[in-house]
Image (tube, grey):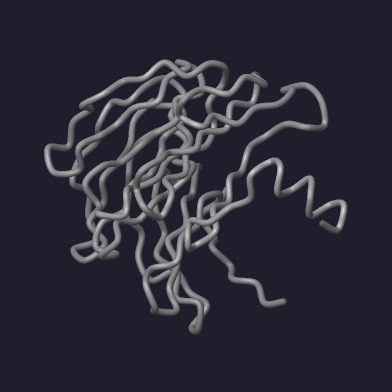
């Protein structure tokens, strides 16, 4: 296993591939920045500052020209130009903004605001929140399905499902739900199919 030294940047968290290139975008919470990392040269190519508190997760537009960071401490997303390597501004979404994803057409950014118990929908072109949806308790991740028709949200303090396909579990127990994975073709298993498969059916 190879390691890449990101110093002086610390507390990397969110990471996304940048198209077919051997580069990734990585957040650094302490630097309040998004790092562009060359995996072959094993160096930080560029540092794009967000100047927001706890830039945690990152999502990238389909064209890989714009990135969005979820900034927990500031309750914002930062819009970052990956070509010009600069900031395009910030949008206030909600307290504890952490989960983030972009629709397949690049038109909307969805955020899970864990401290506000809300989900925000940001118009990428207008750079403004166009919808705010209640989503208890402690929404922490958001993932858009490949067809763009649904957004899955994991809620760390709730076991109740909503019509936004919210996933849940016990916050203090071992079943803490956080990450969400969606198959690239958008196909999945229904609970009955999972049960049948477990029985060998």
Please name whichever residue, 16 or 87, is drawn nearer the observer in this view of the structure: 16
Q: Quadrant of residue 112?
A: top left
Question: For this view, does 17 lie left or right of residue 104?
Answer: right
Residue drawn at 26 percent across, 51 percent down: 80
Please name whichever residue, 112 or 67, is drawn nearer the observer in this view of the structure: 112
Q: In this view, does 11 lie above or below 45?
A: above
Question: For this view, does 48 lie left or right of residue 159?
Answer: left
Please count the marks in the image. Answer: 0
The x and y percentages for residue 173 are 81, 25
Q: In this view, does 125 lie above or below 188?
A: above
Residue drawn at 45 percent across, 29 percent down: 164
Farthest right residue? 199
The x and y percentages for residue 96 are 47, 24
Question: For this view, does 37 lie left or right of residue 194?
Answer: left
The x and y percentages for residue 1 are 72, 76
Question: For this view, does 124 lie left or right of residue 150?
Answer: left
Farthest front residue? 201
Q: Is residue 127 above or below residue 95?
A: below
Residue drawn at 63 percent across, 44 percent down: 190
Q: Quadrant of residue 157?
A: top right
């Amino acid at each position: 296993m190879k390691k890449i030294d990101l110093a002086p940047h610390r507390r990397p968290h969110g990471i996304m591939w940048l198209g077919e290139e051997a580069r990734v975008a990585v957040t650094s919470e302490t630097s309040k920045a998004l790092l562009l990392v060359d995996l072959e040269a094993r160096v930080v190519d560029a540092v794009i500052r967000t100047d927001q508190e706890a830039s945690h997760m990152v999502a990238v537009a389909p064209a890989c020209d714009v990135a969005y960071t979820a900034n927990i401490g500031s309750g914002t997303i930062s819009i970052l130009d990956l070509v010009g390597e600069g900031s395009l501004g910030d949008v206030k979404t909600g307290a504890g903004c952490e989960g983030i994803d972009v629709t397949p057409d690049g038109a909307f950014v969805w955020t899970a605001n864990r401290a506000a118990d809300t989900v925000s929908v940001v118009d990428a072109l207008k750079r403004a929140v166009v919808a705010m949806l209640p989503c208890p308790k402690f929404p922490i991740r958001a993932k858009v399905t490949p067809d763009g028709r649904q957004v899955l949200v994991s809620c760390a303090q709730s076991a109740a499902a909503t019509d936004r396909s919210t996933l849940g579990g016990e916050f203090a127990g071992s079943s803490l739900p956080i990450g969400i994975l969606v198959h690239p073709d958008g196909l999945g298993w229904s609970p009955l199919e999972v049960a049948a498969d477990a029985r060998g059916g």
